[in-house]
Image (spheres, rainbow, N blue to C red):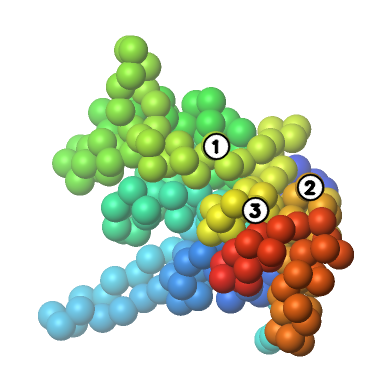
């Protein structure tokens, strides 16, 4: 999905800072899955018919074949797509729902927008009511429920959303759930969007590189004011 000028014009959001495989690792999804989201895919059925699926995550053309192509806004979109798939929805059902969100929220990068938090459940509920495809209603019911007369996202999606903070209407930080008992975030203004121990400002890679050099866990923990168990948790997640 090409980057639109309607997304905030800040290079922290729009400049490519990740390789696709790196972005996949950060949000804890398989590399091929992320590639399918970001470039789409096509295949032929046994009956000879063609199936094509367009991209759903923002990327840019890299300057060379091995260059970075994923901006932070694309990582933020992919994080929400991961929430939807974790809810048990197949990708072919998520795509039309995302297109509806983009159209009715009015932003090509709606998944990275704060409006997803405030309006997304209601917009998707309308999608289910207006679609003539029963599968779309199943999609919405997999994502949205009614609580106290209001549409809200199901808990599995809310668990993802509660780890997102926003600034000026766009995703600012994402807390990475795979780092147990350590607050590791990605923030395009901090360490170039690399996973970082939030209250220390230390890149995860700086810790893991020392561990892989066989430095003692206790020494690393002491240097970074972490506990040994936190250092070991970082290594397991990274």
Tell me the mark number nearer the camera, choosing from 1 and 3.
Answer: 3
- The residue sitting at the right extreme is 223
Q: Secondary structure at mark 2?
A: loop
Could you tell me if residue 134 is visible in this image? yes
State left or right for residue 145 relative to residue 61. left
Mark 3 or 2 closer to N-term? Answer: 3
Look at 57% across and 67% down and name the residue there: 237
Foreground of the two, 227 or 182: 227
Cα separation, mark 1 vs mark 3, equals 16 Å
Q: Where does label 1 land, which residue?
A: 162
In-front residue for pair 218/169: 218
Circle on res. 73? none
Residue that lies at the very extreme toward the top in this rendered image = 149
Element assignment for label 1: loop
Point out the tag, 1 or 3, that comes first from the N-terminus.
1
Q: CA separation, marks 3 and 2?
A: 9 Å
- Quadrant of res 51: bottom left
Name the residue carrying label 2. Answer: 199
Q: Which mark is residue 182?
A: 3
At 35% across and 70% down in the image, what residue appears? Answer: 52
Can residue 64 be seen by looking at this rendering? no
Question: Viewer-proximal residue, 64 or 118?
Answer: 118
Q: Residues within 10 Å of mark 1 (few under 14, many from 20)?
A: few
In the image shown, does 223 or 5 lie closer to the viewer? 223
Mark 2 / mark 1, whichever is N-terminal: 1
């Amino acid at each position: 999905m090409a980057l639109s000028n309607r997304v905030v014009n800040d290079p922290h959001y729009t400049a490519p800072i990740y390789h696709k495989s790196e972005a996949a690792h950060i949000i804890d999804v398989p590399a091929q899955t992320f590639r399918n989201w970001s470039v789409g895919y096509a295949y032929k059925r046994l009956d000879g018919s063609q199936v094509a699926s367009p991209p759903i995550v923002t990327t840019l053309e890299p300057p060379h074949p091995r260059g970075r192509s994923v901006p932070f806004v694309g990582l933020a979109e992919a994080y929400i797509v991961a929430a939807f798939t974790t809810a048990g929805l197949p990708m072919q059902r998520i795509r039309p729902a995302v297109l509806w969100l983009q159209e009715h929220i009015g932003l090509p990068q709606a998944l990275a927008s704060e409006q997803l938090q405030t309006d997304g459940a209601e917009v998707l509920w309308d999608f289910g009511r207006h679609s003539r495809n029963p599968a779309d209603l199943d999609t919405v019911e997999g994502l949205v429920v009614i609580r106290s007369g209001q549409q809200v996202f199901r808990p599995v999606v809310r668990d993802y959303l509660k780890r997102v903070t926003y600034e000026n209407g766009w995703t600012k930080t994402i807390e990475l759930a795979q780092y147990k008992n350590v607050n590791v975030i990605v923030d395009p203004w901090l360490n170039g969007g690399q996973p970082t121990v939030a209250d220390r400002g230390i890149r995860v890679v700086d810790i893991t590189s020392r561990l892989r050099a066989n430095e003692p866990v206790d020494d690393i923990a002491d240097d970074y004011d972490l506990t040994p168990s936190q250092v070991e948790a970082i290594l397991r997640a990274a």
